Structure formats: C-alpha cells, structure tokens
Image (spheres, grey):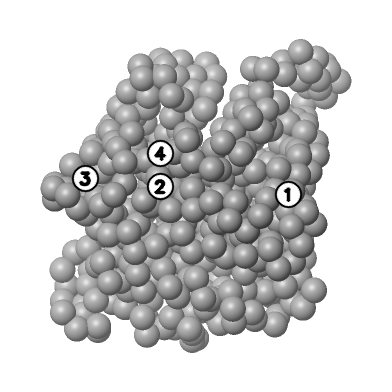
Amino acid sequence: MTDDQRFLRVAGARLVDGSGTPVRLRGVGLGGWLNMENFITGYPANETLMRRTVRQVLGEERYHRFFDRLLTVFFDEADAAFLASLGLNCVRIPLNYRHFEDDRAPFEILEEGFAHLDRVIDLCARHGIYTVLDLHAAPGCQNHHWHSDNPTHLPAFWEHRHFQDRLVNLWRVMAERYADNPWVAGHNLLNEPADPTGEIIGPFYARLVQAVREVDPRHVIFLDGNTYSTRFDMFGDPWENTVYTCHDYALAGFVYGGPYPGYTEGVWVDRDQLERKFLERSEYQRRTGTPIWVGEFGPVYTGDPERDEQRYQILRDQLDIYDAHEAGWSLWTYKDVGLQGLVHIAPDSAYARRFGDFMAKKARLGADHWGSTDEGIRHVVDPLHAFMDEQFPDYDPYPFGRRKYTEDLVRHILFSQPLTVEYAELFRGLDDGELDALADSFSFAACVRREPLARILAERCRPQEAGSSGALRAG
C-alpha cells in the first residue's frame, strides 16, 4: 500500500483508507507521557507544579536528565511491538502545549518539543499503528481538572482570546508539520473541553478547524464534545472529514464505583444502563451518520480479584456495545503505576520502592481525583459537605455540582499542592544512577502486564501470537 492509500478519511459513518477499505481505529491512549497525570505516575496535583518543585530539588541539568529519560523509556520500540501483537492499530497521544511553547514567550514554537513526538509517531508507524494527536492541555486550561494541567478549578481558556489565539497558532504549526504523514490518523484538537457558557466553544471550533484546514486539508479532524466530551449540542450539520468524539466512562468503573451490576451513587448500573449512556453520548454521531469513535473509556482496578472481575465485565460489555455499533475506541490508559494501565510498574521496581509510601499517603488523604476516595478523611470532609448543603442548598456549579466542586477545591487542590513538596523531596540526595533507575521502572522490560486486560483486547482484535510480548512479565 502506498503512502497516499494509507491516509484515512471519513466516508459516511466509517473511516476508510485510500483504497476505500473501512478502518476501525481500536487502540489505547498514551496518558502520562507528553501530558503527565498524577494518578498515572504517582505524583500529586498538576504537572507544572510537580515539575517546578522537582526542578528546585534536582537543579536544571539533573531535572532534564530524569524527565528526558522517563519520556524515552515510557514508550519505546518494545511498547509499540507489544500493542501491535495484540492487534491494536491506534495510539492516541495526549499533548501538553508546554512542550511546544513557553508561557514566557507565547507564540514562539519550541522545536525541541517535537523530538519525542516524532520518535513515537515513527515507532508506531513501523509497527502498522496509526496515531491520533490529542491536545490535552491548552494554554489557560480548557477544563477544570488536573488533566489539563490546571492548578485551579477555573478553565480560563474560555475567558481570554489570548489563550485561544495561542492554541490556533500551535495547531497550525503542528498540522503543517504532519500534513504529509499518512500514519497520523488525524488531529484531536481539544481534549474534554468544558465551556461553562456553552456559547464560546462552537464559534471557536469553527475558527480552529478553518485554521487547521488551511495548512492541512487532508487529515481527519477529531472534535470532542463540550462538558468533557459528552455533549454535542453546539454542532449543526457535520463538517467534512470530521469525527465527533465521545468519551464513555462507566459510573460503576470509577474508583468509588460498584458493584456491577449494582448501585453506584444511587444509580443502578448494568449492561442496559451502559448502553443507554453510550446511545445518549453518541446521539449526534448516529443522527448525522458520522463515524463513532470513543476517545476514552475504561474502568479502574482495585487489586481485589472479585471487584476487578466486575470491572473486566464492564469492559467486555462496553466493547460488545461498541462492536454492535461499529464504533472505534481508544482505551484509557496504556501505562501507569497500577491503577488502570494495560501495563504498569512492578511492585519491586525502584520507583515503587521509593514512592510507594508516599502514594499510599496520597491515597489515604484522598488527594488523587481519579485514583482515591474520601474514605480516610470523611471526618474532615463530611462536615464541610454538610455545611455547604445547609448554607448553599441551591448552589449547583458547572460541570458536576456542589459536592464534586467542594472535593476539587479541598482534596484535589488544597491537600494536593503541599504534597508536591513531599514528592519532590524524595528526589533529594539521589545520584544519577538512582535517578535513571526510577525512570527505567517505566520501561517495557521492567513493567508488568495486566494479563486479563491484554487478553480481552487481543480477543477483540486478533489472537496474540505466541512469544510476541517480549520480556514483559505477566501479572
């Protein structure tokens, strides 16, 4: 197949290649890499604050040594080969704009920021895997949470034209850079936007799409809906060569969820409920006859065999639903410290030994939005929730209401930010070899595979060939 034939495009409700053959993108998200997240690599709060405190401890040179090595080993040749062995054909790559632009010099593109991205796009291509470029953290933060590298609870991106202008400029650069690369499946322009007014996102998307099309008219554009990619009411008729991307996390699959089937937060969750939520989130795509691609989904795991088997059943049921509707998907996430990843660090790794007690404290304090609950601090937060309910009974802030708003401010900001100092201090006194060992804990050869999850994914794509998973340990 020629390069021209490998380019994907939208044809009705499907993606097809240059020969017209349907291609259903099924793969993983590379969370925690060029956009780091606290639950994925075990640090607290948001990425920029974490990096700043670690830099203060290590100094400039050794700070760059550690993070460059971490980015190198986190996804390498063996990782791409492993994903290909499972039959997966797509990696969605979340990006933090700070790799490509410095806030102190807006609109000036950092060429060095593309080194790792170019490397992984090429690695995936060599193994027959498409990549989707996902702008996960925008200037000013497009949503309220840690995964847009937001140190507050305010998405300032929607309030300041300056931030929007910078994103348009960055995407023009990125789209032009990869315009002739057929292994880039397309551009996911903004992850999980949360425009509180619902009035800015539509016109901004129109402006952004036009800017990208001017330099790259060929690639598919992936657009997330508003309110964390669950609402599409800002769109009218679909745009040409565009996929409207929904995210489909199951309530029973969250860290506090379950049992399955059973009640989570007063909602009965079973296969029928999963399908109703999927149909609700994909209504625009089905009504307009455009491709369905679930850009993120997947449960978290607890370590309890019985509960985790329920989580695997959630995953199987969701995949059955996606298959029935010919929906593509990208599982969240590929690699982490053990909460959700297809691959995770080993319990005896240098990183787990160094940061294990700290991560346990972070969980005990409920300071990790995605990976912990308030079970250990209810004596602190329950009175606060009761006070908010009593004093502000009608307060219902966007996007998820009063209780989650309070938790964001208290657990995930107030408690998390001072924890970054403790995290950074654990780097103090380490020599270069010890720093390298921490980073190398995330290399494919040192990691453990979540075997039931790998088996489920392989069964959905094609049987895994014997011996193709390399040196990775099963676990």
- Label 2 SS: helix
Q: Residues within 10 Å of mark 1 (few under 14, many from 20)?
A: few
x 22%, y 63%: residue: 23
Residue type at the position of mark 3: Ala
Disc 3 target residue = 458
The answer for how far apart the CA atoms under marks 3 and 2 are is 21 Å
- Label 1, label 2: how many angstroms apart (C-alpha)? 24 Å
Q: Is residue 299 left or right of residue 375?
A: left
**Identity of the amino acid at label 4?**
Gly
Of badges 3 and 4, nearer the viewer stands: 3
Q: Quadrant of residue 186?
A: bottom left
Q: CA distance from mark 1 to mark 3?
A: 43 Å
**Whether residue 283 is situated above or below residue 376 in the rendered picture:** below
Residue 110 position, x and y percent, is 64, 79
Marks 3 and 2 in Cβ contact (< 8 Å): no
What's the residue type where badge 1 is placed?
Gly
Callout 4 crowding tier (Cα within 10 Å): few <14, some 14–19, many ≥20: many
Which callout, 1 or 4, points to the residue nearer the camera? 1
| Mark 4 lies on residue | 298
Task: Find residue 274 and report its horizontal and vertical position in percent.
Answer: 36, 31
**Residue plotted at (45% across, 19% down):** 258
